[in-house]
Image (tube, rainbow, N blue to C red):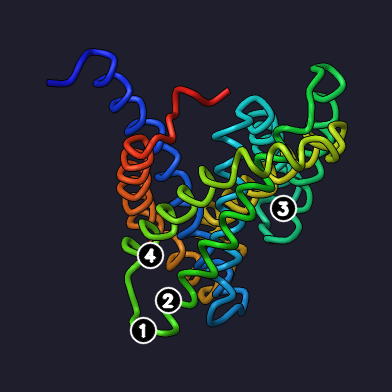
Amino acid sequence: MLTKDQFAVIVMTLFVWGFAGALFGALFAGLYQVLQVLGLIGWQPLIVAAAAAAMTTSAFYSAMPVALVGAMAGVLSSIGYLIATGQEIELFMIVGIAGTAGVVAGSFYAWMVTGGSRPLAETLTGLLAGLLAGGSLAVALAMSGEEIGMFVLAAGVVALVGTFFQISERWLLTRTAGWLPGILSAPVVAGLIAAVVGASIWIVGGTTSAMLDVSTRDAIGRVLHDIPPGLLGGLLGGALTGLLLELFGFHLEDRH
């Protein structure tokens, strides 16, 4: 029979890891398709999408205030871009503007709130976990020769990233937090989040924009088609991975 505290830990683990996994899975699915539209082939979109999604999710998971500042800057700058250009949506332009706004907002946050290099260290840990997870899956898929759907792919990536992140987090933080410049931590993380937000607005707004040709709208439609299974796969992979890690001693409640 579970005690009240044990039940609360399980529920919290499922909720936090499930939410983080769903965010990761949706981002991964969207980025994976966008990178294919942009011309990346083979193992490239898998590794790049896993690394980018892992960086973004780890920022929200470990440095929520900085991530929210970046997200707000990304939303406001992207909307301003759309208003100023008359709904003309160019991916690299909107990402560049949003990323720049995020860096500025993150710099202001770092000036207002004294902080260290932990947000950047956590984000870099997510990057490493994403590279390891994406590389491992790319090798496994190349050896097996099998093609798998986005639901299974997202669940697998989330499970591997979550495992690599938890195993390497404390070891990497103790070695990177000391030499990473704290003054750059918030601007870099906020800029990253803002750039991802800008890309997301490009994905959503592109299907309804009359400025884009039919082939581009079809490509964006394929991106949107893969986001729901990516979200659900990430949700399942995150929840199960979090529960297993909790059972093996990686306690969420011990994070600080």
Badge nearest the viewer, 1 or 4: 1
Q: Which residue is mark 3?
A: 94
Is residue 178 left or right of 192 when viewed as pictured? right
Q: Which mark is residue 153?
A: 4
Residue 71 x, y percent position in the rendering: 64, 35
Tell me the residue at 58%/49% (across/down). 201
Q: Mark 1 touching mark 2, by CB under 8 A?
A: yes
Total marks drawn? 4
Q: Which residue is mark 2?
A: 140
Q: Nearer the viewer, residue 237 or 102?
A: 237
Alpha carbons under labels 4 and 2: distance apart: 12 Å
Q: Nearer the viewer, residue 94 or 7?
A: 7
Q: Amino acid at mark 4?
A: Leu
Circle 3 Cα neighbour tier, 10 Å, few/some/many (<14 / 14–19 / ≥20):
many
Q: Amino acid at mark 1?
A: Ser
SS for tag 1?
A: helix
Q: Which residue is mark 1?
A: 144
Alpha carbons under labels 3 and 1: distance apart: 38 Å
Q: Is residue 105 above or below residue 216?
A: above
SS for tag 3?
A: helix
Badge nearest the viewer, 4 or 2: 2
SS for tag 2?
A: helix
Tell me the residue at 57%/35% (across/down). 60
Q: Which mark is residue 173?
A: none
Alpha carbons under labels 3 and 4: distance apart: 28 Å
The mark that comes first in sequence, 3 or 2, is 3
The mark that comes first in sequence, 3 or 1, is 3
